Amino acid sequence: MMPNLKCDSLKINEPELVKNIIHAFIEFADKMENIYQLNVKNGKYFSLASNISRIQSGAGWYVIVDDKKYPLYIGTASNLNKRLNTNSGSLDNFNNQNRKTDSIRNFIKKYNSLGLISKLFVIIIYENDLREWMKTICTNNITNPLTPLDRNNIEKIISIYRSNIFNYKAILYK
């Protein structure tokens, strides 16, 4: 018998639930109100475009994409505004001269600053929005709030199925 993936209340070993999560993220990724321009400030911090002072501070997921909507990074946060729009939340140890490695987020900041990645956007999906969507569309409801394990599991599902969600194959093979 094949072992199950570790989870809390979110039954990610059930194919129907995984398909519903993918479907939800496809819908959320296409909504303009979930997409924000993302800037790199001082080569070290992420910040939202100047016309957007802040986003909700709720938990959820964020996908950093380039101008063609190609996903560069998928993350989760207990406070999306703090993670994406404050110096402390988006520094990623970049100022530490003794750091041993850099996160993918630091590579994105550097390559944006060098002009290798022209524009950055972030697609934001709030946990509350996903929970409400799941209530109306399917029988697999998500409990309130998700545990860190379940939130991280959804991040992994998004990462695995990003080509389905963001449909970047069509852009690459035109």
Image (cartoon, rainbow, N blue to C red):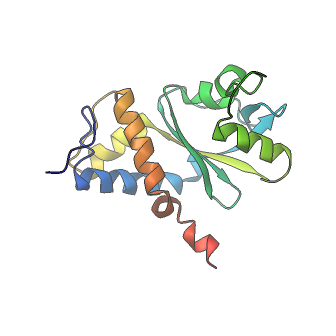
- In which quarter of the view is residue 97 placed? top right
Picture coordinates of residue 78, whole percent (x, y): 48, 26
Q: Residue furthest bottom?
A: 174
Residue shown at 23% from the left, 42% from the top: 11
Question: Would you place residue 174 above or below residue 83 in this image?
Answer: below
- In which quarter of the view is residue 45 placed? top right
Picture coordinates of residue 112, whole percent (x, y): 79, 46
Residue shown at 64% from the left, 32% from the top: 84
Residue shown at 49% from the left, 27% from the top: 58
Residue 50 seen by the camera: no
Q: Nearer the viewer, residue 146 or 100?
A: 100
Picture coordinates of residue 108, whole percent (x, y): 72, 44
Residue 7 seen by the camera: yes
- In which quarter of the view is residue 127 placed? top left
Horizontal side, residue 121 vs residue 145: left or right: right
Picture coordinates of residue 32, whole percent (x, y): 59, 52
Horizontal side, residue 62 vs residue 149: left or right: right
* Callout count: 0
Q: Nearer the viewer, residue 123 or 72?
A: 72
Q: Nearer the viewer, residue 11 or 79?
A: 11
Question: Would you place residue 40 above or below residue 20 in this image?
Answer: above
The quadrant of the image that shows the C terminus is bottom right
